Image (tube, helix red, strand yellow):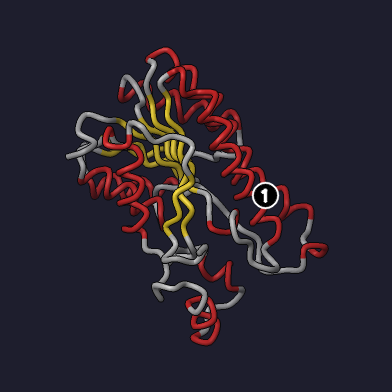
Amino acid sequence: MRLQGKTAIITGGASGFGAGIVQKFITEGARVMIADINGEAAADMASDIGDQAIAHTADVSNSTSVQAMADAALTHFGHVDILVNNAGVTHLPTPLDEISEEDFDRVFNINAKSVYLTARALVPHMKQREIGAILNVASTAGVSPRPNLSWYNASKGWMITATRAMAVELAPKGIRVNALNPVAGETPLLKSFMGEDTPEIRAKFLSTIPLGRFSQPEDLGNAACFLCSDEASMITGVAMEVDGGRCI
C-alpha cells in the first residue's frame, strides 16, 4: 500500500496507460480522480472501482475546464498529493510539411499546453502544503523520434524539458516532478502511431524494441506508482524510459 492516504488526479485516466495507472494507484491505496474527455468512460470506471475513485469530465487543453477539474478534486479530497499528466494525442504518420495546422494545434494543446494549465491550477496548492508529486507521461518519441511523427515527437520533447524545468524550480518547495517515456503500447493510440494496424507493421515496430513487446498499461502503472510514492523521495527531474530497451 505504497500510496495509502494519497490523493491523485490522473488525466486521460479512462483508457490506455491512464487506466493502468489508475488501477495501480487504487491497488496501492490512493484515492483517485479519473479525469477524461470521455466522461462516460470515466464514470463507468469509477463506478466499477467504488469509493476510492471519482470521475470528472475534463478537456485538458481548456483553462476553464482544467481549473474546474482542480477545484472539484480539492473539494472532494480536501487536498491533492499527486498529479499525473497522462492525457495525450498524436497525429497520423505524415511528412512534417504536410501536417495541417489544425492537427499541429491539437497535438500541442493537449500534449504541451495541458502541462502548463494543470501546473497553474494545482502548483499553488502544492506550494502551500510544501509537498506534492507531478508525473508527466511523455514518450520515447521525445528522445528517439520516429519519422513522420515529427510534431508529436516535438511535443513529447517539450514535455521532457518542461519536466526538468519544473523539477529544478519546484524542488525547494518540496514538489517533485518526473516523467515517463513509454514506447508504443497496447492503447487506443497505437493504430494512430502506426497509420494502420497490420501484422507486418506491428512486426516492424516490435523489431525496434529489444525486449520484443509493446508497453502495457500495467508497465506504466508500476513505474508511475514508484515515482509518485515516498520511495522515490530523492528522485526529481527524471524522464524514466519504460521502453523495453528501445532508446539504447
Q: Is residue 128 left or right of residue 76?
A: right
Which image quarter is the N terminus in? Answer: top left
Kindly identify which residue carries mark 1. Answer: 106
Which x, y percent locates residue 228?
A: 34, 37
Residue neighbourhood size for the residue with mark 1, other residues' Cα within 10 Å, grouped as few (<14), some (14–19), many (≥20): some
Question: Seen in the image, is 146 located left or right of residue 190?
Answer: right
User: How many marks overall?
Assistant: 1
Q: Quadrant of residue 195?
A: bottom right
Q: Which residue does the image show at 44% across and 34% down from the upper left?
A: 236
Residue at x 37% of width, y 54% of height: 220
Farthest residue in the right direction?
A: 97
Residue 152's spot in the image, x, y percent?
65, 56
Measured as percent of width and height from the top left, residue 6 is found at 27, 30
Q: Vertical placement of 86 versus 165: above or below?
A: below
> For residue 178, which quarter of the picture?
top left
Secondary structure under badge 1?
helix
